[in-house]
């Protein structure tokens, strides 16, 4: 029997985000993917005050516990922190796909931060071979929809999915995200 694929879902920030908001997204993803995937959903430290140093350390620990070929998903600020952590220190594990949902672009042209900045050459710094998908609801009032264009420029290999009528939580409908995960390229048996 083939073991299930592993997915690590990194929550967004804000008080109650883990148990009152993003949990609905995770449950939808689990339903959409069925039993062929194990979706891990750890609570990030001090979710009401997301800090890069705390969250990136937790993300790195979680990724280290995954098998090669896992998929990492980050929502909102969790997606921005995930990308910066992967670009700053690529994991030893080979990732099958990186998915960000409604992530603000933190850097030139986007939001400003004293903690970290996503650079215009982000794509070359991400783990090689990993498929990258960026999902953005066009009715998102938290992370402006035009931030998806900043990701497209910084990560040329990314597939950008702009979803009409969807909000910051993608209306708790992750069917398109599940499809991107199901159709992502599996890693070859031996490294290239």
Image: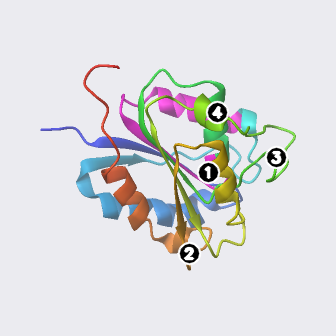
Q: For numbered disc 2, what is the local secondary structure? A: loop
Judge by depth and name the residue closer to the eye, 113 or 55: 113
At which x and y percent is residue 39? 39, 48
The quadrant of the picture occupied by the C terminus is top left
Precedes in sequence: disc 1 or disc 3: 3
The residue range painted magenta reads: 54-79
Real-space Cα distance between discs 2 and 3? 25 Å
Residue under label 2, please give it: 166
Marks 2 and 3, the one that precedes in the sequence: 3
Tell me what residue is drawn at x 74 percent, y 37 percent.
119
Which of marks 1 and 4 precedes in the sequence? 4
Q: Name the residue at 53% across, 74% down.
A: 171
Classed neighbour count for the residue bearing mark 4: other residues with Cα under 10 Å, few (<14), some (14–19), many (≥20)? many
Count residues near mark 3 (Cα–Cα under 10 Å), then give few for <14, some for 14-19, many for 20+: few
| Element under disc 1 | helix
Residue 108's tag is 3
Question: Could you say whether the residue bearing mark 3 is in a helix, strand or loop?
Answer: loop
Q: Is residue 119 left or right of residue 40?
A: right
Crowd tier of the residue under label 2, counting other residues whose Cα lies within 10 Å: few below 14, some 14–19, many 20 or above: some
For mark 4, give the secondary structure.
Answer: helix
* Residue carrying label 4: 85
Residue 138 is left or right of residue 144, and the answer is left
Q: Is residue 78 visible?
A: no
Asked whether residue 67 is drawn in magenta, I would say yes
Local crowd size for mark 1, using a 10 Å CA cut-off: few (<14), some (14–19), many (≥20): some
Instruction: Find residue 165 and report its horizontal and vertical position in percent.
Output: 56, 80
Q: CA distance from mark 2 to mark 4?
A: 27 Å
Q: Which residue is mark 1?
A: 152
Q: Which residue is painted at 52% across and 47% down in the image?
A: 158
């Amino acid at each position: 029997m083939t073991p299930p694929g592993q997915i690590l879902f990194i929550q967004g920030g804000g008080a109650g985000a883990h148990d009152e908001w993003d949990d609905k997204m995770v449950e939808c993803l689990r339903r959409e993917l069925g039993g062929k995937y194990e979706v891990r959903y750890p609570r990030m430290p001090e979710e009401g005050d997301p800090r890069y140093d705390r969250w990136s350390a937790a993300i790195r620990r979680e990724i280290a516990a995954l098998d090669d070929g896992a998929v990492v998903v980050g929502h909102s600020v969790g997606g921005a922190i995930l990308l910066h952590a992967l670009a700053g220190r690529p994991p030893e594990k080979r990732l099958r796909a990186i998915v960000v949902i409604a992530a603000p672009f933190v850097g030139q042209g986007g939001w400003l931060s004293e903690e970290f900045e996503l650079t215009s050459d982000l794509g070359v710094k991400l783990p090689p071979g990993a498929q990258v998908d960026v999902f953005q609801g066009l009715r998102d009032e938290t992370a402006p929809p035009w931030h998806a264009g900043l990701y497209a420029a910084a990560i040329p290999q990314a597939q950008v999915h702009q979803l009409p009528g969807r909000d910051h939580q993608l209306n708790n409908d992750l069917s398109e995200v599940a499809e991107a995960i199901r159709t992502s390229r599996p890693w070859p048996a031996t490294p290239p």
